[in-house]
């Protein structure tokens, strides 16, 4: 991955459903098969895959339901590999993409102090990575009969906070791309949406922030707390379900009222 050692990033998670998220006919309830993409360290991705496979072993279908795959989402060849592995490993077309790869410079430089290298690193992962995965998914999901694409932005786009110039710019591009892709995929059975979380208690959020900075962000939220990963995961889960079929081309700000 392009990510530098000092620059925290979140993994990109890929969910490939065995059963198409469409409910014109009774669902077959075949469950989901996942490819979990990671950038550099495999420990968290492997642990999640092991946990999912362990739970699956207790069911009737004891075949693996998840695998972890290392790939650079800013490289077309690696993105193609992720989809190839999913289809080969599970012998089924891909139907769902959730791309939450992201990098953020923990120094929070002003635009005047942002280097070209820092700018390009941010846009390569956050914007180019979203473009490449969305492009590949658009073609693969169409061949499989439709599905769901969910990209991840940030409520920082709406907050326009100083120190987030490159990050907010890279995520704003993802939001616009979401809206256009949803229209371009008319008739394909594919929905494209974007989830834009507010402050969420993750490694990426805490990197470089003092307790005072964190406290100010908590104070700015009407609910008086940071978000938790599950707050965001539940929204994504809805979007990729049958119930989310009528939601398309939307940017959903999941932030507890941090930005309204």
Image (cartoon, rainbow, N blue to C red):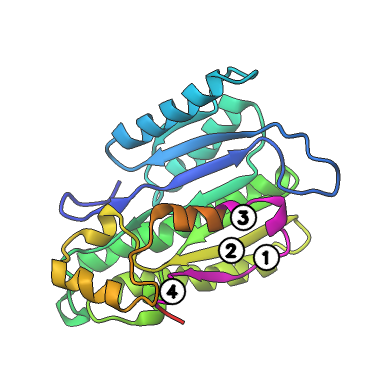
Question: Does 260 sit above or below residue 36?
Answer: below
Question: Does 2 sit above or below residue 33?
Answer: below
- Near-viewer residue (85 or 198): 198
State the residue at coordinates (68%, 69%). 183
Question: Does 56 sit above or below residue 8?
Answer: above
Around disc 4, counting alpha carbons within 10 Å, would you say few (fewer than 14), some (14 to 19), or many (20 or more)?
many
3 or 1: mark nearer the eye:
3
- Near-viewer residue (48 or 177): 48
Q: Which residues are magenta?
A: 237-258
State the residue at coordinates (38%, 69%). 170
Distance from the alpha carbon under mark 4 to that under mark 1: 20 Å
4 or 1: mark nearer the eye:
1
The residue beneath circle 1 is: 247
Task: Tell me residue 9's x, y (percent).
Answer: 29, 53
Label 4 near label 2: C-beta < 8 Å? no
Question: Does 41 sit above or below residue 113?
Answer: above
3 or 4: mark nearer the eye:
3
Mark 2 or mark 4: whose residue is earlier in sequence: 4
Res. 164 in view: no
Task: Tell me residue 46's x, y (percent).
Answer: 37, 30
The residue beneath circle 2 is: 193
The residue beneath circle 4 is: 172
- Near-viewer residue (5 or 29): 29
State the residue at coordinates (62%, 57%). 239
Label 1 near label 2: C-beta < 8 Å? yes
2 or 3: mark nearer the eye:
3
The residue beneath circle 3 is: 238
């Amino acid at each position: 991955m392009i990510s530098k050692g000092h620059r925290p990033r979140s993994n990109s998670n890929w969910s490939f459903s065995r059963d198409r998220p469409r409910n014109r006919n009774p669902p077959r309830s075949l469950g989901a098969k996942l490819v979990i993409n990671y950038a550099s360290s495999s420990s968290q991705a492997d642990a999640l895959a092991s946990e999912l496979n362990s739970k699956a072993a207790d069911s009737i279908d004891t075949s693996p339901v998840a695998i972890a795959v290392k790939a650079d989402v800013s490289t077309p060849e690696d993105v193609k590999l992720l989809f190839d592995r999913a289809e080969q490993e599970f012998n089924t077309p891909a139907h769902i993409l959730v791309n939450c790869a992201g990098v953020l410079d923990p120094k929070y430089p002003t635009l005047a102090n942002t280097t070209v290298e820092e700018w390009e690193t941010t846009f390569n992962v956050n914007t180019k990575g979203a473009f490449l995965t969305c492009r590949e998914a658009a073609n693969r999901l169409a061949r499989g009969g439709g599905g769901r694409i969910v990209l991840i932005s940030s409520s920082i786009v709406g907050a326009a906070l100083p120190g987030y110039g490159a990050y907010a710019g890279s995520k704003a591009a993802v939001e616009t791309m979401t809206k256009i892709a949803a229209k371009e995929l008319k008739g394909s059975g594919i929905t494209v949406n974007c989830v834009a979380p507010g402050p969420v208690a993750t490694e990426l959020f805490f990197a470089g922030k003092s307790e005072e900075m964190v406290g100010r962000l908590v104070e700015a939220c009407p609910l008086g707390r940071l978000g938790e990963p599950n707050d965001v995961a539940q929204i994504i889960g809805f979007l990729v379900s049958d119930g989310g079929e009528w939601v398309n081309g939307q940017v959903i700000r999941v932030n507890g009222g941090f930005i309204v």
